[in-house]
């Protein structure tokens, strides 16, 4: 018969392995700055500081917050944009603010 201590150790190892698998999966799924996030399922997959999927005439792509151009990749510039937040409950706009993000030039 397996002791309670052995069962607890097995459960702890299993939980740790699941956690590691989740972290690895999220890293593999991450989209770099400037990468396309046009698919709705990718909107939360952008990586980087304050990363977000932004929509513009250039399409939907991943961006990060910035304070100066040198914080953005070579083909992007730090610009003030309008950010809108919508309610997950009913889709209504809950907040509008101006933020600085790296945008394609």
Image (cartoon, helix red, strand yellow):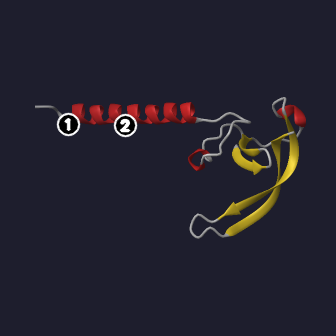
Q: Quadrant of residue 101?
A: top right
Q: Residue at x 66, y 37 (%)?
A: 47
Q: CA distance from mark 2 to mark 1?
A: 17 Å
Q: Is residue 91 left or right of residue 12?
A: right
Quadrant of the frame with the C terminus: top right
Vertical order, 54 against 77 (above or below)? below
Q: Is residue 76 left or right of residue 85?
A: right
* Mark sitting earlier along the chain (2/1): 1
Dot 2 falls on a residue whose secondary structure is helix
Vertical order, 3 against 43 (above or below)? above
Q: Which mark is residue 4?
A: 1
Residue 18 position, x and y percent, is: 40, 35
Q: Nearer the viewer, mark 2 or mark 1?
A: 2
Q: Classify 10 Å Cα crowding around label 2: few (below 14), some (14-19), many (20 and above).
A: few
Given residues 74 and 56, the one toward you in this image is 56
Q: Residue at x 20, y 36 (%)?
A: 4
Q: Residue at x 70, y 61 (%)?
A: 85
Q: Is residue 49 left or right of residue 8?
A: right
- Which residue has dot 2 on it? 15
Quadrant of the frame with the N terminus: top left
Residue 94 position, x and y percent, is: 70, 68
Dot 1 falls on a residue whose secondary structure is helix
C-beta proximity under 8 Å, tags 2 and 1: no
Q: Is residue 14 left or right of residue 93?
A: left
Residue 56 position, x and y percent, is: 78, 50
Q: Residue at x 89, y 36 (%)?
A: 69
């Amino acid at each position: 018969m397996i002791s309670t201590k052995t069962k607890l150790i097995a459960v702890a190892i299993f939980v740790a392995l699941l956690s590691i698998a989740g972290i690895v999966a999220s890293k593999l799924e991450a989209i770099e700055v400037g990468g396309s996030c046009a698919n709705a399922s990718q909107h939360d997959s952008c990586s980087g500081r304050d990363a977000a999927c932004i929509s513009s005439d250039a399409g939907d792509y991943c961006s990060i917050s910035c304070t100066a151009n040198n914080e953005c990749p070579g083909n992007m510039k730090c610009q003030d944009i309008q950010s809108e937040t919508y309610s997950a409950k009913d889709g209504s706009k809950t907040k509008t603010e101006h933020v600085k993000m790296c945008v394609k030039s």
